[in-house]
Amino acid sequence: MKAGFIDTSMTKQDGVSEALRGFLYANRRRASAIRLMDTDWPQSALLRTMLVDYVSLALKDGRNALVLNAIDRGALAYEKTLGKKPDWHRLCGFLDTASRSLAMELAGTRVVSERGATWTPDSGCTLLSWLHLEQKGEVRKERASAEEVERIRIALLTYLSKQLPAKARGDSSHA
């Protein structure tokens, strides 16, 4: 991820559903797994939107939004477990893979405002919320620790936890 600036205009929620739709269209192989996930778990669409809200579509690997890469990897994990029981393990597989992938890509990321306030992915605060207070910030990448990856994953799962089925809540937090 390259250093750059990010502001509230780059994180508008209006474009999230369109970006997700475009992403799924471009990745039709994953789209079938996503459709099955949405059938099995109606709240999964909200979970994907919440993942996007947490870090926005503005944080990219150069070409793709980091969060869309993570959703793609999670959908692949879901797809690989189709037909296996119990069903909720598939949702946990999606969440575990997506959260681990996103945490690894976000580790070391800092967004620093002109006032010196810093957003880190393990803060538990969405980047969108932080930007509403700070208006804009510079995206920086620092050396990350292994502990930071786990803290980010836990922050993501905690943020999503209110929307998870009780069984998935217990399984994902220990995955």
Image (tube, grey):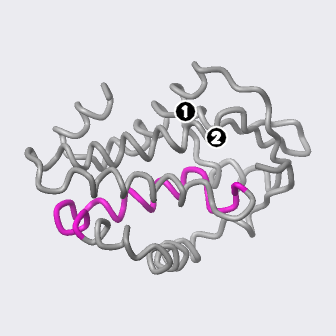
Q: From the top left corner, tell me how far across and down residue 40 is, in percent.
A: 16, 62
In the picture as drawn, the residue positioned furthest to the left comes out as: 85
Contact, mark 1 vs mark 2 (Cβ under 8 Å): yes
Residue beneath the point at 20% across and 60% down? 41
Q: Which residues are magenta?
A: 36-61
Residue beneath the point at 91% across and 45% down? 114
Nearer to us in this view, 131 or 16: 16
The amino acid type found where label 2 is placed reads Leu
Nearer to us in this view, 15 or 28: 28
Q: CA distance from mark 1 to mark 2?
A: 8 Å
**Residue tagged 2:** 106
In the picture as drawn, the residue positioned furthest to the right comes out as: 114
Which of the two discs, 1 and 2, labels the residue nearer the N terminus? 2
The amino acid type found where label 1 is placed reads Ile
Q: From the top left corner, tell me how far across and down residue 89 is, in percent.
A: 19, 43
Quadrant position of residue 72:
bottom left
Dot 2: few (<14), some (14–19), or many (≥20) neighbours within 10 Å? many
